[in-house]
Image: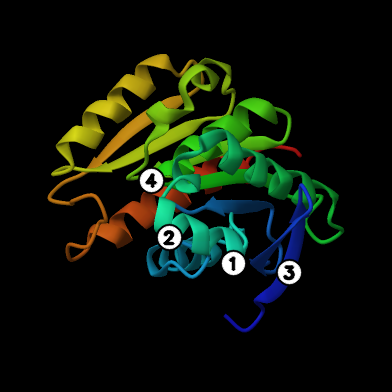
């Protein structure tokens, strides 16, 4: 997208690369937390971000890990499941958006995929005054554990209809959430929403949720 701008966040001393897009007259911004072994270059998250941008909302895709951490994690796989660590990085991004001159007036939402969904929910629990909406796509919200009951933001859990084990885990998380909540199942979709029409359907569900809860409220 031509108005995409590269940014660098520094969280706990770690420099994290990101891409920020702010459409004209945007009232909200969605921060993406990618899933296991992924990055801001995830084609699925970039597609979803494009749909959200078309709906008039800003987006921030950023790397939760530094290049060195990514290299270590590609071997060990440890950091991608360290929800507390990932949430701390995401909270740093939430705080940055709340301070940055071009985004500080925007209502904030978090979109998480896979383990990033748990990080998004922990961030929402830790920043209840800032995070106004959460969407999980094929996520593991159950890994947010004790934070689920503290989430105040309206939360949408999107799961593929053929992703049976993850449906069960999302239902368990849904039962623990006390905020406005919804579980939406995309028929015929597997975990990565690779089937024809599955990802667009998930993206449209996410965009509609964020539009509803980020543009119809005062900051």
The first of marks 3 and 1 along the sequence is: 3
Disc 3 versus disc 1: distance between alpha carbons?
Answer: 15 Å
**Residue at left offset 38%, top offset 45%:** 114
- Labels 2, 3: front one: 2
The answer to which of 160 and 39 lies nearer the viewer is: 39
The answer to whether any part of residue 54 appears in the image is: yes
The answer to whether any part of residue 37 appears in the image is: no
The answer to which of 68 and 154 lies nearer the viewer is: 68
Q: What SS does tag 3 mark?
A: strand
The first of marks 4 and 1 along the sequence is: 1
Relative placement, left or right, of 138 versus 121 is: left
Relative placement, left or right, of 59 versus 198 is: right
Q: Which residue is tagged 4? A: 114
Marker disc for residue 67? 1
The first of marks 2 and 3 along the sequence is: 3
Q: What SS does tag 1 mark?
A: helix
The first of marks 3 and 4 along the sequence is: 3
The answer to which of 210 and 161 lies nearer the viewer is: 161
Residue 23: percent from the left, percent from the top?
66, 68
Q: Quadrant of the C terminus?
A: top right
Marker disc for residue 7? 3
Q: Using the rendered view, name the quadrant where residue 192 is placed.
A: bottom left
Marker disc for residue 74? 2
């Amino acid at each position: 997208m031509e108005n995409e701008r590269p940014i660098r966040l520094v969280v706990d001393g770690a420099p994290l690369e990101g891409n920020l897009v702010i459409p004209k007259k945007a009232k909200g911004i969605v921060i993406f937390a990618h899933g296991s072994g992924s990055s801001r270059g995830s084609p699925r998250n970039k597609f979803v971000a494009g749909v959200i941008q078309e709906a008039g909302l800003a987006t921030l895709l950023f790397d939760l890990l530094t290049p060195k951490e990514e290299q270590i994690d590609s071997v060990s796989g440890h950091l991608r499941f360290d929800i507390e660590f990932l949430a701390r990085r995401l909270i740093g991004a939430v705080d940055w958006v709340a301070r940055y001159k071009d985004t500080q007036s925007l209502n904030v939402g978090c979109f998480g995929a896979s383990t990033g969904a748990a990080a998004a929910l922990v961030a929402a629990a830790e920043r209840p005054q800032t995070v106004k909406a959460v969407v999980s796509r094929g996520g593991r919200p159950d890994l947010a554990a004790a934070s689920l009951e503290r989430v105040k933001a309206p939360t949408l859990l999107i799961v593929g209809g053929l992703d049976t084990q993850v449906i069960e885990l999302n239902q368990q998380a849904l039962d623990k959430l006390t905020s406005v909540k919804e579980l939406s199942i995309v028929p015929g979709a597997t975990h990565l929403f690779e089937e024809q029409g599955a990802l667009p359907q998930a993206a449209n569900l996410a965009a509609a949720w964020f539009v509803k809860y980020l543009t119809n409220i005062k900051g």
